[in-house]
Image (cartoon, helix red, strand yellow):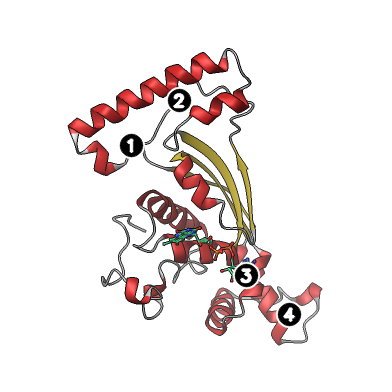
Amino acid sequence: MEPLVKLINYTPNPERIIAAAARLCYSDKNGEDLFENLTDSEVEKLVRKIISLGHYSVLEHVSFTFAISGISRVTTHQLVRHRVGCSYSQRSQRYIEEDNFNYIIPPSIQERPELLKKYEETMNQLNSLYEEFAKVVPKEDARFLLPQAIESKIMVTYSLRALLHFLELRTCRRAQWEIQTLAWKMLKEAKKVAPLLFEDAGPGCLRGPCPEGKLSCGDPYFSNGIEL
Ligand SMILES: Cc1cc2nc3c(=O)[nH]c(=O)nc-3n(C[C@H](O)[C@H](O)[C@H](O)COP(=O)(O)OP(=O)(O)OC[C@H]3O[C@@H](n4cnc5c(N)ncnc54)[C@H](O)[C@@H]3O)c2cc1C
């Protein structure tokens, strides 16, 4: 199962909104004339200026909402560690029965038939136990038997500033494989609708020396096999 990512909403004309906010900072224009003669090349210039200056609070005026499924609770747990400028709604294990649950199989297990067999048997056993317990105890208690591998679904809304920060950390080769794949897919979706805002988005090594220091993978910029 692959992460499924759908960009379901975003601030209309996000690049123009950022450019207008930049204009407000750097000119004496009022609200009503912020968009006056705001040509595409002016938008491009202002967006690049804001990003190159590190004036990132301006990026908080636009947001992106993704509906995500086909990922494990391992990964949703990592996702929700991102706290600032991020909102989440996740499939509930209190209200939804998790019988016959789907689960994620890591590639390293998938490619080892002897481990894969044990893995699948364990998931089936856990499923049977869950079903047995859920008949007697509340779902919120039966769920203690569920594995981290279980598939979850989550909706996330990030301000552009938060999204760029998330992408920097999680597209990095040092990030865990599932959240890394997810992050690249989110970048791909966002870049389709706002290419200028995401032209330099991705791991830190795209914009300068690797921020991971001694832990660096040592490889040049890579795109995790996902064509942007
Ligand atoms: C490769 C990798 C390995 C990781 N390993 C672990 C691990 O072993 N254990 C673990 O617990 N986590 C781990 N994490 C998660 C990591 O510690 C962060 O919780 C997660 O990446 C969210 O990043 P963040 O705090 O920068 O994001 P956000 O929570 O969105 O915060 C954004 C920024 O706001 C500022 N900020 C937020 N809160 C505060 C605050 N309270 N005080 C001051 N400034 C604040 C910081 O500048 C922060 O970068 C790992 C992450 C990565 C990418």
Query: Decide: marks 1, 3 in contact (CB < 8 A)?
Result: no
Indicate the secondary structure of the residue bearing disc 3.
helix
Q: Which residue is mark 1?
A: 105
Residue 44 percent across, percent down from the top left: 54, 76
Precedes in sequence: disc 1 or disc 3: 3
Residue 51 percent across, percent down from the top left: 55, 78
Indicate the secondary structure of the residue bearing disc 4.
helix
- Drawn side of residue 219 relative to residue 228, left or right: left
Precedes in sequence: disc 4 or disc 2: 4
The answer to whether one can see residue 37 in this image is no
The answer to whether one can see residue 66 in this image is yes
Q: CA distance from mark 4 to mark 2?
A: 51 Å
Type of amino acid under label 4: Leu
Indicate the secondary structure of the residue bearing disc 2.
loop
Q: CA distance from mark 1 to mark 3?
A: 37 Å
Of circles 1 and 4, which is in front? 1
In which of the image's four quarters is ligand 1 placed? bottom right
Position of residue 228 relative to residue 142, above or below, is: below
Indicate the secondary structure of the residue bearing disc 1.
loop
Label 1 neighbour load within 10 Å: few <14, some 14-19, many 20+: some
The residue most toward the bottom is: 27
Q: Which residue is mark 2?
A: 101
